[in-house]
Amino acid sequence: MDTIHHARIVSDGTRLAVYQLKDVYGRALAYPVNDQAETIQGLTGFKTLRRNDIAKIKQLGFRVVTVHGENIQPNMIG
């Protein structure tokens, strides 16, 4: 089972917004992996996580993490 699929399964029904960090043309972008993160991105109208959204998502009671469980900090994406 690959990492993305595993992260989706174990985070189902939790307060985790899981993202996969990808380097796109030298820029780190965070793509949603699980249903919670996909729903959040649907609300923002953006395909990827933005730096200023992280604090707002945390205010809603979610942890914003990578597929490896590491908390995403604003300086990790750009």
Image: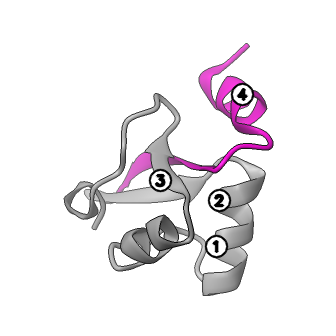
Q: Is residue 18 magenta?
A: yes
Q: Which residue is drawn at the image coordinates 47% and 72% (left, top)?
A: 59
| Range shown magenta | 1-24
Q: Quadrant of the C terminus?
A: bottom left
Q: Which residue is drawn at the image coordinates 34% and 79% (left, top)?
A: 52
Q: Earlier in the sequence, mark 1 or mark 4?
A: 4
Marks 1/2 in contact by CB < 8 Å: the verdict is yes
Between the residue at mark 2 and the residue at mark 4, the CA separation in whole angstroms equals 14 Å
Read off the residue under disc 4: 10
Marks 2/4 in contact by CB < 8 Å: the verdict is no
Tell me the number on the disc at residue 30.
none
Between the residue at mark 1 and the residue at mark 4, the CA separation in whole angstroms equals 20 Å
Read off the residue under disc 1: 41
Q: Position of residue 68 (x, y in %)?
A: 46, 28
Read off the residue under disc 3: 64
Q: Amino acid at mark 1?
A: Gln
Between the residue at mark 3 and the residue at mark 4, the CA separation in whole angstroms equals 14 Å
From this view, report whether residue 66 is shown above or below residue 54: above
| Horizontal side, residue 63 vs residue 15: left or right | left
Q: Is residue 28 magenta?
A: no
Question: Which residue of the protein is positioned furthest toward the left in this rendering?
Answer: 75
